[in-house]
Every structure is written in structure tokens, then in C-alpha cells.
Image: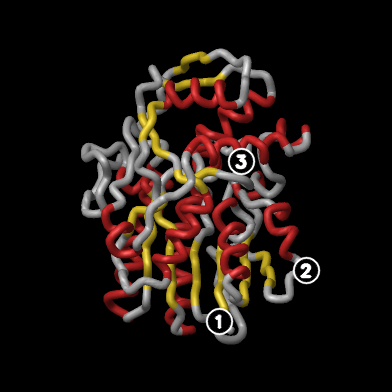
Amino acid sequence: MERVLITGAAGFLGSHLCDKFLNENFQVTGMDNYITGSPKNIAHLKSHPRFEFIEHDVTKYINIDGKLDYILHFASPASPIDYLRIPIQTLKVGSLGTHNVLGLAKAKKARLLIASTSEVYGDPLVHPQTEDYFGNVNPIGPRGVYDEAKRFQEAMTMAYHNFHGVETRIVRIFNTYGPRMRLNDGRVIPAFMGQILRGENLTVFGNGSQTRSFCYIDDQIDGIFKLLFSDYHLPVNIGNPEEISILDFAKEIIALTNGKSKIIFKELPVNDPLQRCPDITKAKKILNWTPKVDRITGMKRTFEYFKSLSDEELYKTQYKNFDKYIKK
């Protein structure tokens, strides 16, 4: 039986990856320090005979006993609220954390897949974004700690691949949504749905003409899985190319949820991308992958999940482990 290590296992994407690999009959070792992940996301796995969990900060040395066939590095703050409050930890997990998992992959002769992001393109001047576009990133802006951490992560991964011969894969993840998202993480889907559930108005930044595209979690996990077992080592976009403006999206969510909220407008944040849409030509050709879940179906499933949350989860602003990293 093959064994996989998943860092960030208690996060949104990481917990779904744990489910996927267990369903595919792997031995799964999950690792997380709960800085933004939640024990609730993996509570259903604790008694699973092929799942083990290690509470650990990947920016510290990683020691794993026994054989290891695959590593998926998904440990990282991944939303504006996170990386604006813990910028140093965001940089460390993309640099020191990536260095540690690459060293582990080298020692164990394991294949490593790293979770990069569409944020490496910054506020793009090319649309839709192709993998050969180098991006338009402000390294000293408020989003720079996340954007540059991921860009450095890609560079270090390629260095280990080229210099040490480590088997590596790089997925550039575009906006993904679904059950287990944090309602308070600052991204547009949980933000809008949380505002509706709390009876608040929906906040649209700028005039709402900026665009996004949204990929449902099941499709994203399928793309990541296929990339890991492909023979392709350069970055691949995984996302849904169906694009919508934020203003139209706000109206869509109000209609979808029968909400009574109004739309209010606030100033656009610094360096907020005006367009975000993947070119998935490579994913189609190399992985035979395309998203299958349409936005309305995915949104309904996601809203049902958020409706099931307790009042405490609906109104709380952060996870308990968040504060201890702020001054580090």
C-alpha cells in the first residue's frame, strides 16, 4: 500500500485531499498546526484505520518514520484575512516549509506536489492567464507576502527538480469553493454567504466589474490527483474558466439563496486583481481534465453546508491558534 503525506491536512483543500486518497486506498498521514485549519475538518477521519495525524508546523524540521511515496504540500494561509494578519508565517511556510518538504521528498525518494496559486499572476495583464505568463506582482504591496511566497515556492521546487532530480509537480489553483471553507476567511463566496446568513448587506468592492471564476472542490481535487500521477513537472492551471463579474455574482447569490440583502459598495483594496480566469488548455491536453460541476449546483451545495454551521461558527472571527503566530 502506498503512503502519502498531506501538509495542511486540516484545511479546506487538505481535508478533501485526505478523503480522496483514503478512498483510493492509500495510507494517509496528515500534518497541520491548526493555524488556519480546523480539527472539525478531519474529525471524521480520526478512527480511520489508514489515517494518522501529526500536529506539526512545517516550517520546523519534519521527521517521518517509514517509507513515503508521495507528498502534497498544502500548508499555507490562503486568504487575504490570513496573510494580512500573519504575513511572516505566510512567507515562512512558502519558503522554510517548502524547503523542509523538498528535503523530505529527496530523502524518501518521494514525489512531491506543491500547491501554488493563481496569485502568482498578480493583477494580470494577460487574460485569461496561461502558465507561461510571468505575472504582474507588487512584491511590497499588502498581497506580496502571499504572492511572492508562492512564486518562491515554485522556484525552489524547480531547483530541487533540476539540481537534485526530485520528482515534482506544481498545481496553480484558481478560486475553489465548497463545504469546509471557513466562513470568515475573507474570500468572496464565504463572505457573501455569511453576510446573507447573518442578515447583512453584501459588500462589493470597487464597482463590482472585476471578474472571478470559481471551481467546485470535487473538480479541483480530481485535477490535483490527475496531475500528481501525470508525467508533467511544469506548472498546470486547475480552475474553472467560466467567468463572472463580482457584481453579477452578488446578484446571483442573492437570487440563489432567496436572500433579502442589498448590495453596498466599498473602496477596492490595494492590488486586488481586476481579472482572474484560468486558461486550462494544458489541463485538458495533459490530464484530460475539465470541471464538471456547474456553478449553480456547487453554490447550492456550499450554501447548505454554511447553513448547517452553529451560531458560534457563523459569527466567530478566527481560529484559536491564529493569534499565537502574529508576533512571530
Q: Residue at x 69, y 58 (%)?
A: 42
* Element at label 2: loop
Name the kind of residue labelled 2 in the image: Ser
Q: Are marks 3 and 1 in contact (CB under 8 Å)?
A: no
Question: Which dot marks residue 102?
Answer: none
Which residue is pictured at 71% across the width and 46% down the height? 320
Kindly indicate the quadrant of the structure image that contains residue 208: top left
Q: Position of residue 275 (x, y in %)?
A: 32, 34
Identify the amino acid type marked 1. Answer: Glu
Q: Which mark is residue 2?
A: 1
Q: Is residue 321 left or right of residue 227?
A: right
Residue at the image point whose x is 62% and y is 72% from the top: 29
Circle 1 residues within 10 Å: few <14, some 14–19, many ≥20:
few
* Image x and y of residue 293, in percent: 48, 46
Q: Give the label on residue 301, or none.
A: 3
Residue 328 x/y as whole percent: 57, 51
Q: Residues within 10 Å of mark 3 (few under 14, many from 20)?
A: some
User: Disc 2 to disc 3, how far (Cα)?
Assistant: 26 Å
Question: Tag 3: residue type?
Answer: Arg
